[in-house]
Image (tube, grey):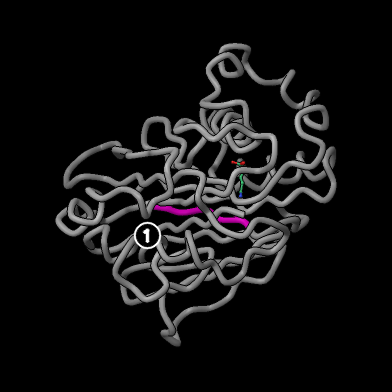
Amino acid sequence: MCRHLGYLGPPVPLGRLLFDPPHALATQAWAPRDMRGGGTINADGFGAGWWPPGAAAPVRHRSAMPIWTDTTLPTLAAVTSSRAVLAAVRSATVGMPVVESAAAPFTDGRWLFSHNGVIRGWPSAVAAMARDLPVEDLLTLDAPTDSAFLWACVRARLRSGEPPSKAVAAVVGEVVAVAPGSRLNLLLNDGHQMIATTLGHALSIRPGRGSTLISSEPLDAGTAWQSVPDGQLVVATAAEVEITPLFSAQR
Ligand code: GLN
């Protein structure tokens, strides 16, 4: 089920995340190692969002095609550097459309968002949650998919001023309450902070000296990678990473 990654730190060429490492995101698209809970390859589209130098908001490239069929991207990625990135490759859940607009990252303003997993009982299980969203948000969903719906829910909370970690954890909590068994690895990046959850899928982090990488699977065999246990909330900047239980009482 989908693979995603986020980066914060000194500018790096996108190629160093997407193509160059032995287990880069493009490799995870056709040879993932840890696809818990379904799917075999991630061939139903891909996307990357990044901040150009000095830009206040990210730019995004998405496609409904497998990442390995884009013959231009490796060259562009080699010469495009950014200090903040969110990229994903997609394995569409059965019944969901394979279209460009269903590929992560979803974006609004400075935010980039991705979801790895599935909402069980979609869409009826979350119909009551949908009723609480602004009608305009529902009418302008990127695609009729669980992931686009999750982004609408998180975005509504962010817009109302909720801290990002609270917004992400609250949406996961709400969905699990009405759709038990859902797999909800979410990833949010605003260019300065990343929020990630583990619920049902693999996730690893590589905290470094002034840079942080979060990825469904480690990009290489480096010993700095740490696997994040299930049921955790990761809050990361380039400088530090904090991991706490997703459903802790304090939040
Ligand atoms: N359910 C989402 C979709 O179809 C995400 C799928 C995934 O994680 N493989 O887009």
From the image, which quarter does the N terminus lie in? bottom right
Q: Residue at x 63, y 32 (%)?
A: 145
In percent of the image, x 56 and y 12: which residue is there? 136
Residue 13, percent from left and from top: 22, 60
Q: Is residue 48 left or right of residue 152?
A: left
Quick check: 250 left or right of 5? right
Residue 127 or residue 73, whichever sits in front: 73
Q: Is residue 24 left or right of residue 16?
A: right
Q: Secondary structure at mark 1?
A: strand
| 29 sits to left or right of 53 | right
Numbered label tally = 1
State the residue at coordinates (54%, 31%): 155
Percent from the top left, x then y, of residue 190?
A: 40, 45
Q: Which residues are magenta?
A: 192-197
Image quadrant of ligand 1? top right
Residue 102 magenta-highlighted? no
Which residue is painted at 82% across and 32% down in the image?
Answer: 125
Crowd tier of the residue under label 1, counting other residues whose Cα lies within 10 Å: few below 14, some 14–19, many 20 or above:
many
In front of the other: 57 or 245: 57
Q: Is residue 146 above or below residue 240?
A: above
Q: Is residue 211 above or below residue 190?
A: below
Q: Position of residue 187 (x, y in %)?
A: 53, 51
The residue that label 1 is drawn on is: 7
Amino acid type shown at disc 1: Tyr
| Place of residue 66 in the rendered image (x, y in percent of width and height, measured from the top left) | 43, 48
Task: Give the answer, above or below, for where 111 lies relative to 129.
Answer: below
